[in-house]
Image (cartoon, rainbow, N blue to C red):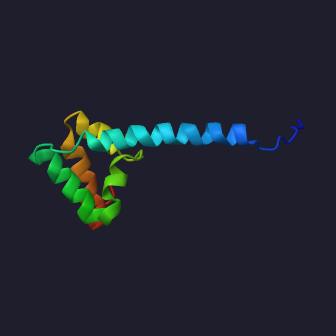
Amino acid sequence: MSETFTPYTKTHTDLLLEKAIIHLDSQINGLRSLKGSGPEIAAVIGKAHEVFGDLGALWLVRHNQVLQSVPLDIILQGKMDRVLQLLSQIEYGVYI
């Protein structure tokens, strides 16, 4: 099977960038939805910051293999305990 190389064009790369921007906008909106949340969600955000520092909020919006989901999605489903448990496992190096 021989494929012909097609050079990237401005149109093609602009489309790739637009898709990335849409994805990032979605993540930003998810994080914004957490602003002003109650103490349970604040505990998760705080723990993510303790474990990952300033990158903690970014960890919340990236797919996690252990959770098989995005931590933010699990938080919004009200299952903060799963995310807190994983953060504690990461913090203390406990793998189950």
Asked which quadrant contains residue 12, the reply is: top right
**Residue 33, above or below 43:** above
**Residue 48, above or below 60:** below
- The residue located at (25%, 47%) in the rendering is 83
17 with respect to 12 (left or right): left
83 with respect to 64 (left or right): left
Mark yes or no: residue 68 visible.
Answer: no
1 with respect to 40 (left or right): right
Mark yes or no: residue 36 visible.
Answer: yes
**Residue 19, above or below 58:** above
Task: Give the camera-side residue of 57 and 87.
Answer: 57
Residue projecting furthest to the top: 77
Say which quadrant the C terminus sits in. bottom left
- The residue located at (32%, 39%) in the rendering is 30
Residue 21, given in percent of the width and then of the height, sits at 50, 41
Residue 75, given in percent of the width and then of the height, sits at 24, 40
- The residue located at (37%, 46%) in the rendering is 61
State the count of labels: 0
Residue projecting furthest to the left: 39
Task: Give the camera-side residue of 70 and 15.
Answer: 15
